[in-house]
Image (spheres, helix red, strand yellow):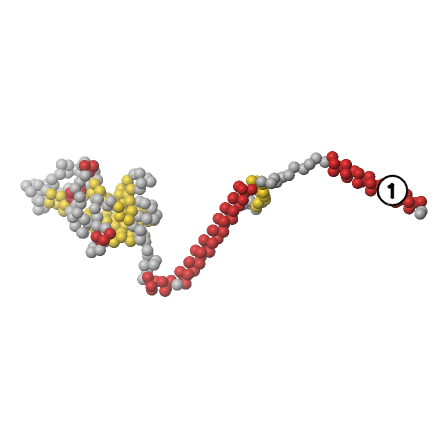
Amino acid sequence: MDIKLKFTVIFVLVSVVVCLSVVLALVVTMPDLQSTVRNYQTCLPSEFGTLKCGSTASLLHEYLERTIAKKFDEIKQEDEKRQQEYLDKNRVRLMSIYDKAFWEMKPAAKLTGKEQPDARKSDIGADMIPVREWRHGRELYDTSGFERYGIRYRNGRLVVPVDGTYFIYSSVDLFESCNPSTGKPNVNDTTKPIKHGIFKFNILDGEEMELVSNVQPHTISSNRYFNSYSSYVSSLAQLKAGDELSIKVSNITYLKYTRDNYFGVNMI
């Protein structure tokens, strides 16, 4: 073999051995790399799209909750879109079947007058006394009254089922006796006017609020035996689900039993 070739092969072999020795020495002396993700940890995409590492249980719960919520919103939007497309496509047919009731199913009620129970001890001296009895339920079958689409009756009050703007109204006939000799009303204080109003109460608020009222002064009777007052009140009111509406008058004895009295609410 040529001497130059022999020295060249020996040099190459020596160089390879030296390089391998250096690499082996570096590997042996290199410190162990700490694992960035342990057995009880994992990495998942965050809500911003970047990879987030942490506890497997918490990250997996967060990821599934976010993914499920996104899917649910997508399905809900698709369902609402499909329902609206169906309504738009079949509007004429549905209108002919339900005669507009399909589009006007809004809470509404109208109660009619009923004889009132005796005044309670708590009513004595009160500025306003609630009307505690109205015809409701089956008692309305032979009257102009009704209860529809979620309106509930409870202890003389109407309870609205959903938030919204409502038209509230009431009409009552009030009668007070007078002194036949003078025609003046038989009341201790004629400066206290006759009042009729609609009030709102919600157990969450804990306070009763006057929504609308009508005030009339006492007058001298033309027939010297009694005075007759007609009072009508109405208003638009922004109500919350669970709001209770009631009618109050300044003197419950003025409230004559008559079916002409009424109390109603309509969502608009």
Is residue 21 visible in this depiction of the protein? yes
Instruction: Identify the residue at the far right of this view.
Output: 2
Q: Residues within 10 Å of mark 1 (few under 14, many from 20)?
A: few
Along the viewing direction, whichever of 89 and 97 lies nearer the viewer: 97
Is residue 235 visible in this depiction of the protein? no
Q: Quadrant of residue 47?
A: top right
Tell me what residue is drawn at x 32 percent, y 48 percent: 161
Instruction: Identify the residue at the far left of this view.
Output: 181
Tell me what residue is drawn at x 20 percent, y 43 percent: 249
- Residue type at mark 1? Phe
Mark 1: secondary structure:
helix
| Residue indicated by mark 1 | 11
Along the viewing direction, whichever of 226 and 217 lies nearer the viewer: 226
Q: Is residue 75 left or right of residue 141?
A: right
Residue 147: x %, y % from top left:
27, 52
Residue 114: x %, y % from top left:
18, 48
Residue 58: x %, y % from top left:
53, 41
Label count reads: 1
Tell me what residue is drawn at x 23 percent, y 50 percent: 136
Relative to 85, say whether 157 is above or below: above
Along the viewing direction, whichever of 171 and 130 lies nearer the viewer: 130
Residue 226: x %, y % from top left:
11, 45
Instruction: Identify the residue at the far front of this view.
Output: 39
Q: Quadrant of residue 130?
A: top left
Q: Is residue 22 left or right of residue 84?
A: right
Tell me what residue is drawn at x 5 percent, y 41 percent: 181
Q: Is residue 81 left or right of residue 117?
A: right
